[in-house]
Image: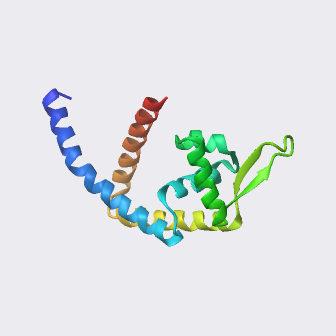
Amino acid sequence: MSHKTLSSFSGELMRIMPQIIKGLFTRQMDALRQGRITIPQFLSLDLIDTHGSLKMKEIAQELNITLPAATGLINRLFKMGLVKRVPSEKDRRVIYITLTLKGKKLIEGIRLTRKKAFEEMFGKLTEREKMMYLSILRKVADMVSGEKK
């Protein structure tokens, strides 16, 4: 791709991305409002659900936040009845954070709402367009993930 073409592509991307992000963000917030949780709370619940159980330090590392911030976040989720603290069987000093049934139901409901929103948004694309879009997104995600490491 020539410099001029790359520059044109970048300019068009800069124009379009805010519209896409705004549309996605609006739909995400609609899903989160149903559960009355914030984005960081959702990210925490999603992370815990994905891993099954995590130590506070692991949550902080995965979310790229400080340990005190993670503790505050989890304390709020605990008070809402969405997570529980489970002592390790091997070392009682080690505490794992897991989802409660209420937390699991909430995360499943939010995921379903998000999935429906994506289906609505991308339903007008052909199968080929959807596959191309996913392929490109995966490549971009890999590049962005590589930058973090």
| Residue 105 left/right relative to 110 | right
| Observer-nearest of 33 and 124 | 33
The residue that appears at 70% across and 66% down in the rendered structure is: 101
| Residue 85 left/right relative to 92 | left
Question: Where on the picture, by quarter, is residue 104?
Answer: bottom right
| Observer-nearest of 107 and 86 | 86
Q: Residue furthest left?
A: 4
Question: Where on the picture, by quarter, is residue 90?
Answer: top right
**From the viewer's perspective, is residue 49 above or below residue 3?**
below
The image shows a total of numbered marks equal to 0
Tell me the quarter of the image containing the N terminus: top left
The residue that appears at 53% across and 65% down in the rendered structure is: 110
Q: Residue furthest bottom?
A: 34
Q: Position of residue 78 (x, y in %)?
A: 66, 61
Q: Position of residue 134 (x, y in %)?
A: 40, 47
| Observer-nearest of 137 and 42 | 42
Q: Position of residue 51 (x, y in %)?
A: 66, 47
- Report the colour scheme: rainbow
Residue 114 appears in view: yes
The residue that appears at 48% across and 63% down in the rendered structure is: 115
**From the viewer's perspective, is residue 88 above or below residue 21?**
above
Residue 119 appears in view: no
Q: Position of residue 93 (x, y in %)?
A: 81, 42
| Residue 139 left/right relative to 48 | left
The residue that appears at 43% across and 41% down in the rendered structure is: 138
